[in-house]
């Protein structure tokens, strides 16, 4: 009898510390599966973030390094430049990537560093107790917005893919989700493409994953999955924002002064 599913060889068989219904564990498994399929376990370097996924290295069995809060792209840049033959993954949450780490995020992408960033967007600060994040939706109730996020006071949620898509150098940008099996499969394909592009030396790749946080949203896991689909996805539309498999020169990608491009 043939097996339809096997535990990923690149994933450690350890108890999880994630809450029930959290999307981080799903994405960890997808990363491990892709590493196995590409046979690159010995070539991957993982930068773990500060946040719920601070222990990512406990689950994904590759050489890893923890970065200070928000500094994962800077650490990943250094690792890649010292070890250009390795595949470097910067794994980050929304507070890490879009709050304290906004500068590192934008400038690593702007430089076109040949790294892969996997961004988990669950619209809230998780590990610290459920405060408003840069991605929290307008009207969303959090510990620091008990009456809902007010855009007049704190601005609108930041769309990372759209922001990075204004830059010249990124080669691959896609937003995915993990609220059901079809979207989980699409997320796996996006992660595999991002790492393949890095392996081929094409440049910076960015995969955003809309994910669930039932504990800090205060809902059941099934409700959280529906909330991602019904509330998050309309504001954060899924899809490929940039895919330049052959690369692109700055001259070709930069609009000339006075010229309207479509």
Image (cartoon, grey):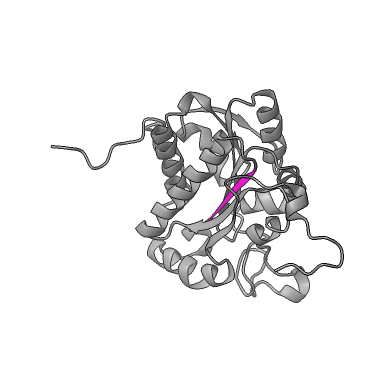
Query: Relative to residue 8, is residue 217 drawn left or right?
Result: right
Quarter of the rendering containing residue 104: top right
Q: Is residue 231 above or below residue 201?
A: below
Residue 253 coordinates in the image, percent (x, y): 73, 54
The residue at 47%/43% (across/down) is: 192
Quadrant location of the C terminus in the rendered image: bottom right
The magenta region covers: 204-210
The residue at 65%/37% (across/down) is: 114
- Give yes or no for residue 77 being in the magenta stretch: no
Residue 220 coordinates in the image, percent (x, y): 41, 64
Residue 174 coordinates in the image, percent (x, y): 56, 55
In front of the other: 21 or 168: 168
Quarter of the rendering containing residue 75: top right
The residue at 60%/70% (across/down) is: 141
Quadrant location of the N terminus in the rendered image: top left
Quarter of the rendering containing residue 178: bottom left
Q: Most prominent secondary structure in the magenta stretch?
A: strand
Query: Relative to residue 7, is residue 246 drawn left or right?
Result: right
Query: Relative to residue 228, is residue 99 drawn left or right?
Result: right
Query: Relative to residue 101, is residue 26 drawn left or right?
Result: left
- Viewer can see residue 165: yes
Residue 122 coordinates in the image, percent (x, y): 55, 58
- Viewer can see residue 21: no
């Amino acid at each position: 009898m043939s097996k339809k599913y096997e535990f990923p060889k690149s994933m450690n068989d350890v108890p999880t510390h994630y809450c029930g219904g959290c999307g981080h564990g799903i994405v960890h498994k997808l990363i491990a599966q892709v590493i196995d399929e590409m046979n690159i376990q010995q070539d991957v370097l993982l930068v773990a973030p500060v946040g719920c996924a601070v222990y990512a290295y406990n689950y994904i069995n590759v050489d890893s390094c923890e970065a200070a809060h928000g500094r994962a792209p800077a650490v990943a840049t250094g690792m890649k430049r010292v070890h250009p033959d390795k595949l470097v993954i910067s794994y980050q949450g929304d507070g890490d990537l879009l709050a304290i780490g906004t500068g590192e995020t934008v400038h690593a992408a702007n430089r076109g560093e040949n790294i892969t960033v996997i961004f988990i967007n669950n619209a809230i600060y998780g590990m610290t107790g459920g405060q408003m994040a840069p991605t929290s939706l307008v009207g969303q109730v959090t510990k620091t917005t008990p009456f809902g996020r007010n855009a007049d006071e704190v601005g609108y949620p930041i769309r990372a893919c759209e922001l990075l898509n204004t830059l010249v150098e990124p080669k691959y940008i896609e937003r995915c989700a993990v609220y059901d099996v079809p979207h989980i499969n699409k997320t796996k394909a996006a992660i595999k493409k991002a790492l393949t592009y890095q392996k081929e030396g094409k440049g910076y790749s960015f995969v955003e994953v809309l994910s669930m946080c039932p504990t800090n949203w205060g809902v059941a896991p099934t409700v959280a999955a529906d909330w991602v689909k019904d509330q998050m996805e309309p504001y954060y539309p899924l899809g490929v924002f940039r895919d330049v498999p052959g690369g692109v020169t700055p001259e070709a990608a930069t609009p000339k002064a006075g010229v309207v491009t479509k």
